[in-house]
Amino acid sequence: MNPATTPQRQRLLRPAPVRGLPADFRWGVATSSYQIEGAAAEDGRTPSIWDTFCRVPGAVEGGERGDVACDHYHRMSEDVELIAGLGVDTYRFSLAWPRIQPGGRGPVNTKGLDFYQRLVDELRGRGVTPWITLYHWDLPQELEDAGGWPERDTALRFAEYAALAHDALGDRVEHWTTLNEPWCSAMLGYAYGLHAPGRRDLGAALHAVHHLLLGHGLAAGALRDAAGGNPLELGITLNLGTATPETDSEADREACRRADGMGARLYLDPVVHGRYPEDVIADLAAQNIELPVRDGDAAAIATPIDVLGVNFYRGALFSGVTDDGSPIDAEGVPVVRMVDRDLPRTAMGWEINPTELTDLLLRLERDYGLPTVITENGAAFDDTVAPDGSVPDADRTAYLADHIAAVVAARAQGADVRGYFAWSLMDNFEWAYGYGKRFGIVRVDYDTQVRTLKDSAKWYRNTIGLTRAGTA
Ligand code: FCB
């Protein structure tokens, strides 16, 4: 039987149950600079911490790196056409700081800015709204050489770069996200050594947390000033999940408090409520770690934002004891242990449980009360190309459909969710995993750079079309 006509495939090409979404619900696709652009040494771009990290033996699967990636820098017009063809109204992408301000300080690099000016113009020309992320992890290497995010000066540099970017693009771009997932920048980059710059120092990582948040706040202020009275929708994007205790035991509930504290509240509380969570600060003090907070920082970090960007990939179950029942591990640290559940998984090994997205959105509404946009959601699967050239990625389509349904359910229960952006527009450089993990709704053949719509992309287009028409 032709795979294109199997009943299962037909069913999966049907649009998602999006009844109830307003016609102005924002639909998008997302990418980031280092993951797609390539052209690493062109037109004045200087190395970022990812260019350096990729060259560390063993840091990235297969020694892969972003020198060429999806060659988006040279194929931008073709990619904009692709984006417009999907029927999305919004494209979320990031600016490469080392392209715009090589070395992280000093004057702008006109050629680097030109690229983003053309991108913005082409998007707008095709009726697609640009949504800019200022920092999606590609810190100029020189700033890391000067100490990186654990140093306060990096926050000041970031605010300056934000103002430069807005000066150049602010007349045409209304939607600005300061940081993408500061937890990843700080913890994966400075504590666990899994992302650039590959350091393993928990104290430095917590200093990075504070300076990332300060950088966010200062940049938010700079963007507000630069915008004057012009429209500006400003936000930060956090990676958020849910933490469920394995049992009702005090130890398991304590593990969830800690996981949620370090993963979510450490970022949300200062940004939205203007103060760090006391319990997390006390946990850190017990490890002799203190955040380098100065007078005025709390107010800067809490500079009002308009929207909270939520990147959701998974929730998790936590236990507060070791396999042999101890609440303290061999190093004397309280146990926070993720417990595997019997759930389907993506190619990343991440559990699939869409109702946790509904739970998360309701919790954010209750505790923080900001409008949200899902700035990333999606899944890697081991795609196969059918003999006719199509990519029947039923698993990804199901993942997207079920998570969009989870958003619809959250809205129906009162969560103010205003948009959904699929991660990702196309297969790309998945950080320490290299090119092996494919998150795109569009397939990229890395030998030829040919882009092919996967079934999930066609399905997404249908779903968006029906929402707009109000017939979903
Ligand atoms: C997020 C990142 C994004 C991508 C997805 C899979 O943490 O923001 O760049 O790697 O995960």
Image (cartoon, rainbow, N blue to C red):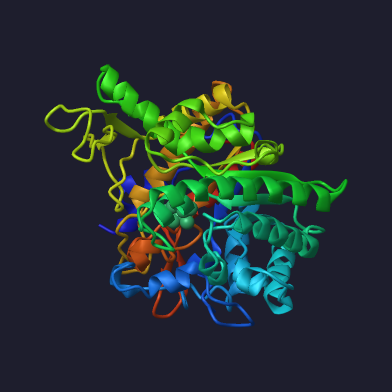
Residue 368, position in %: x, y?
59, 27
Q: Is residue 438 left or right of residue 153?
A: left
Q: Quadrant of residue 319?
A: top left
Residue at the (74%, 73%) spot, across then down: 107
In this view, the residue in front, 378 or 15, is 378
Q: Is residue 43 above or below residue 436?
A: below
Residue at the (30%, 73%) spot, across then down: 57
Q: Quadrant of residue 30?
A: bottom right
The image shows a total of numbered marks equal to 0
Q: Tell which quarter ligand 1 is in.
A: bottom left
Residue at the (54%, 79%) spot, across then down: 39
Quarter of the figure that contains the N terminus? bottom left
Quarter of the figure that contains the C terminus? top right
Q: Is residue 455 visible?
A: no
Residue at the (31%, 65%) spot, across then down: 386
In this view, the residue in front, 153 or 50, is 153
Q: In the displayed image of the protein, which residue is found farthest to the right? A: 229
Q: Is residue 73 visible?
A: yes
Residue 155, position in %: x, y?
63, 54
Q: Is residue 4 left or right of residue 98?
A: left
Residue 418, position in %: x, y?
63, 37
In this view, the residue in front, 10 or 345, is 345
Residue 254, position in %: x, y?
33, 24
Q: Is residue 264 above or below residue 247?
A: below
Q: In the displayed image of the protein, which residue is found farthest to the front? A: 288
Q: Is residue 175 left or right of residue 460?
A: right
